[in-house]
Image (tube, helix red, strand yellow):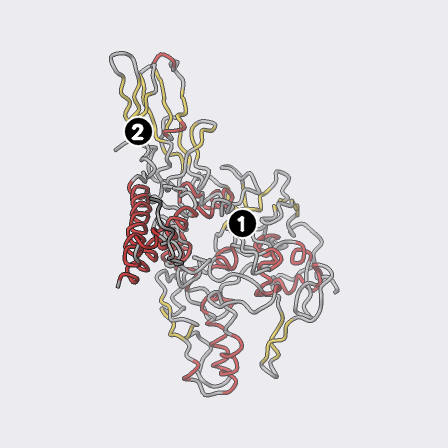
Amino acid sequence: MKLATVFASAAMLVALVASWIIQDRQPKPVALTPTFTGQVEYCLTCHADLAQISTSHPVETFGCVSCHGGERLALDADLAHSTMRGGANPSDLAAVEESCGGADCHNGLAQDHRDHIQRVQTSLQTTYAGAIAQMRYTFGAQADLAAHYGVQAVETQEKTNPNTPDALLAFDPSKETAPGILKFAENCLTCHLEAEPLPGAQTYRFTGCAACHTPTPGGDPEQIVHRLTTAIPYTQCNTCHNRGNYDLRSMTFQTRSDLATDRLHDYYQPIAQFTRCEYTLDCVDCHTRQEAMGDGNIYSKKKDIQYIQCKTCHGTLAELPKTTTITDPNDLALRQAFLNPVIDLKVGDTILVTDKDEPLWNIRQLPDGAYEMIGKATGQRFTFRPVKGTACQQKVDQQESRYCHECHAVQR
Amino acid sequence: MSAMPSNDKRPSPDLTRESLSRRDFLALSTRLLLAIGGLVGLGELTRFLSFTPDPAPPESYDLSPADQYAVGSSTIISQARAVLLHTADGFSALSLVCPHLGCTLKPGPGGYACPCHGSSFDAKGHLKNGPANKPMQALRIEQTPDNRLILHTGK
């Protein structure tokens, strides 16, 4: 009995000394009380060296927990990270409502142009509804080409187009019987914002908002980048849109085997021809945020939402491109230019707008009638003139971009 | 009479060993271990109880003396995230915490601007453009009888 008491005392002493040593090795807590939450958090104790994610999200204002979740008072790494949202990526669509949403942030009202989350969740980039509808129609599982299913079930809250559905059901491969659809379900559902990317540096990206807004230089998954930007280079779009193609005979994905030597050849379509704009600019220089992130309607095919044409910027022989002069200091164009200040846009400037009146805020009319475009990702300045008044021989009834390509595409 | 030499060949008795039985040794060890453990535990308890969290930021700042601020001046009070204005009407103060989401406003031409989201305000704190939808918050300035200025940032 006495011997047991000695051992118990020794064990207690060892435990106390171990506890002392462990406590002594704990880093000195670094407290931060972000203005946005007003609640102290100790994340900077370990993460003080992390780069600020963007000028719109300073850590002094938002802290870490309002976006990432986690246990704000914990100093133990496992405990602190145990309740994080979306792992290292709080913008994953499974967590985005809680991380990035809220009426003050990216769940804002439609009229404030801040309802990004609802629009993204109903966009084709998330629903993949077009491809699912095409495949189900092709293999006889549905009678029309309209979207009925998405990767996840979704309802629209901002429908403005009466010809679009109110909701999509979740696509369930277990209820399909056609081998072609099953093969599609097995191979193709990585093409949407909720899916983990295919392995390999060429296709590496994050999910959710970060799939576009967190460019991954070099595509190295080990090099996690703490960055959010609207200056999105074409290489980020390539992680989904330029990685290869599906062989429709075998229904297998064929990754690119060629190694592009220059931008012109860095496209997977072997037969497509491209104009100078397409292989010089970045995708975001022309394609608008509604095209990329959706407009709140649930569409059945890409053509329903992708509407930018050559004439949007260049006009036609009969008409100049559509423009607007900024008069309101709250104009969306000014806000977008503020977030990516590659151009000193101001009230009084005349900019191009699309057929849907989306501002092309990086394209400004010059006093001599020409236009200047500033690359959103590069800051590079380009100038161009409208088609009107030139020797272009385009026919009046042939205004789509494919007709422009007949003359202006470069032979590859 | 001299003492007779002893014929006892046994070694001299180990008085220590004889006086500290196994039972006593265990009891002593237990007491020693418990004492050291108690001291270490007490030390840990003291360290735990002596932890003081970072103090909350103050809600009032002594900006005195008042006569160091010329009429027509506007002075940034960085530690209070505020600007002190001195006009012909007297002293006033505005919070530099943006009423949108809380970034710190920066002074610029004709007023103040939010470096995070682009809201801007004129020199009197009136909203020029959003996304903020409120003017800059006015703060209370107290001028004491001995001409000291106290800025109150609390609500």
Comparing A297 with A244, the one in front is A244
Q: Amino acid at mark 1?
A: Leu
Q: Secondary structure at mark 1?
A: strand
Closest to the observer, A262 or B78: B78
Whether residue A109 can be seen here: no
Quadrant, the C terminus of chain A: bottom right
Q: Which mark is residue B118?
A: none
- How crowded pointer 2 is (Cα within 10 Å; few <14, some 14-19, many 20+) is rated as some
Dot 1 alpha-carbon crowd within 10 angstroms: few under 14, some 14 to 19, many 20 or more: many
Q: Which residue is mark 1?
A: A360
Residue A215, image x, y percentages? 56, 55
Mark 2 secondary-structure assignment: strand
Q: CA distance from mark 1 to mark 2?
A: 38 Å
Q: Chain of mark 2?
A: B
Residue at the spot of label 2: B138
Q: Are marks 1 and 2 in contact (CB under 8 Å)?
A: no
Viewer-side residue, A383 vs A151: A151
Residue A283, position as x, y percentages in the image: 59, 57
Q: Is residue A18 visible?
A: yes
The amino acid beneath tag 2 is Ala
* Quarter assignment of residue A31: top left
How many marks overall? 2
**Which image quarter: residue A97?**
bottom left
Tags 1 and 2 both on a single chain: no
Q: What residue appears at the point 62 percent right and 52 percent down from the top-left corner?
A: A314
> Residue at horizontal 31%, vertical 16%?
B90
Q: Position of residue A346 (x, y in %)?
A: 51, 37
Closer to the camera, A118 or A276?
A118
**Is A313 placed left or right of B1 in the picture?**
right
Q: Position of residue A264 (x, y in %)?
A: 71, 60
- To which chain does the residue with label 1 belong? A
